[in-house]
């Protein structure tokens, strides 16, 4: 019997949307075909829920569970319900990073609402309610996620920093800019998806996952079919089962259409 996905997991940025944060009609139609086939579609994103919901509400999705904050938070929606919240003590890692980058921006997630920040991030990088608070207040309690940002540095600077510091006791990923996402130890998108799939009775071997960033490495390696978007970093391409086109080249539409043809395509 030919393989067929029983659950589809999708990254958001660079996979579903570009900088506009708008889901195109073609992407909506491709996802609608999956939903029409009775297969759950869930988002697995580094975004906090306050940002992820802006995409969920553009999609033809029913009540579903989504993985946010790189696996540290899972929610059901609609209506909004927090399912999992995994936390860690941010002080040790923030103190270590600030010794090398004393001027770096720091943010901690406030689940379901937004962020507390040490100072304002570049426009459009964080969503939800943003509150500037003293750093000591931010790291005095356990949190789901820490973001370190240095607009004056490069992604390569941050990759080198992460390797140099070791960052033991936490999980981390580096984005396409000088952006370091830190999560509880052992927590990533695959960890979050495994929890969701266990509740849904779906095996990892039956999951189709698409992503384009370094924080998608574990997810693509875990899924039965892990597909990297065109233009993904080499580390992601190395673990992917297949590579599709970029978002601009409708790569997600092509991959979903392989398994879930749109009705007009079937008719032809």
Image (spheres, rainbow, N blue to C red):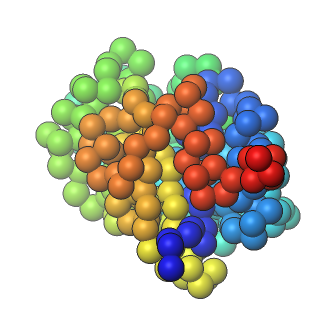
Look at 63% across and 80% down and name the residue there: 200
| Residue 86 picture location, percent across and down | 50, 67
Q: Nearest the camera: 43 or 93?
A: 43
The residue sitting at the right extreme is 79
The answer to whether any part of residue 173 appears in the image is no
Instruction: Give percent across and percent down for residue 137.
Output: 52, 46
In front here: 94 or 149?
149
The residue closer to the viewer here, 69 or 88, is 69
Residue 239, given in percent of the width and then of the height, sits at 29, 53
Q: Which residue appears farthest toward the top when viewing the image? A: 152
> Is residue 58 in sight in this rendering?
yes
**Residue 70, x across and y down, in percent:** 49, 54
Observer-nearest of 164 and 229: 229
For the point 33% across and 45% down, the residue is: 236
Above or below, 216 against 177 in this view is: below
Position of 25 compared to 254: left or right?
right
Left or right of residue 102: residue 166: left
Image point (78%, 35%), residue name: 25
Q: Is residue 160 above or below residue 168?
A: above
């Amino acid at each position: 019997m030919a393989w067929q996905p029983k659950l589809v997991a999708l990254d958001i940025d660079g996979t579903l949307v570009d900088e506009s944060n708008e889901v195109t009609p073609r992407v909506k139609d491709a996802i609608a075909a999956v939903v029409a086939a009775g297969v759950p579609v869930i988002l697995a994103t580094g975004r906090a829920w306050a940002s992820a919901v802006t995409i969920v509400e553009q999609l033809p999705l029913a009540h579903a569970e989504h993985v946010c904050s790189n696996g540290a938070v899972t929610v059901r929606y609609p209506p909004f319900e927090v399912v999992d919240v995994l936390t860690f003590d941010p002080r040790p890692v923030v103190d270590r990073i600030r010794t090398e980058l004393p001027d770096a921006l720091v943010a901690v997630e406030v689940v379901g609402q937004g962020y507390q920040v040490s100072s304002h991030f570049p426009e459009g990088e964080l969503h939800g309610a943003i509150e500037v608070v003293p750093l000591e207040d931010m790291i005095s309690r356990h949190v789901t996620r820490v973001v370190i940002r240095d607009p004056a540095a490069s992604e390569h600077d941050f990759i080198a920093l992460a390797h140099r510091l070791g960052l033991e006791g936490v999980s981390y990923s580096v984005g396409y800019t000088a952006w370091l996402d830190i999560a509880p130890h052992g927590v990533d998108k695959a960890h979050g998806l495994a929890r969701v799939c266990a509740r849904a009775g779906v095996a990892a071997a039956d999951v189709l996952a698409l992503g384009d960033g370094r924080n998608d490495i574990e997810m693509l390696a875990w899924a039965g079919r892990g597909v990297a978007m065109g233009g993904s970093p080499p580390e992601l391409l190395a673990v992917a089962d297949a590579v599709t086109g970029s978002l601009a080249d409708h790569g997600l539409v092509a991959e979903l259409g392989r398994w879930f043809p749109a009705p007009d395509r079937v008719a032809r």
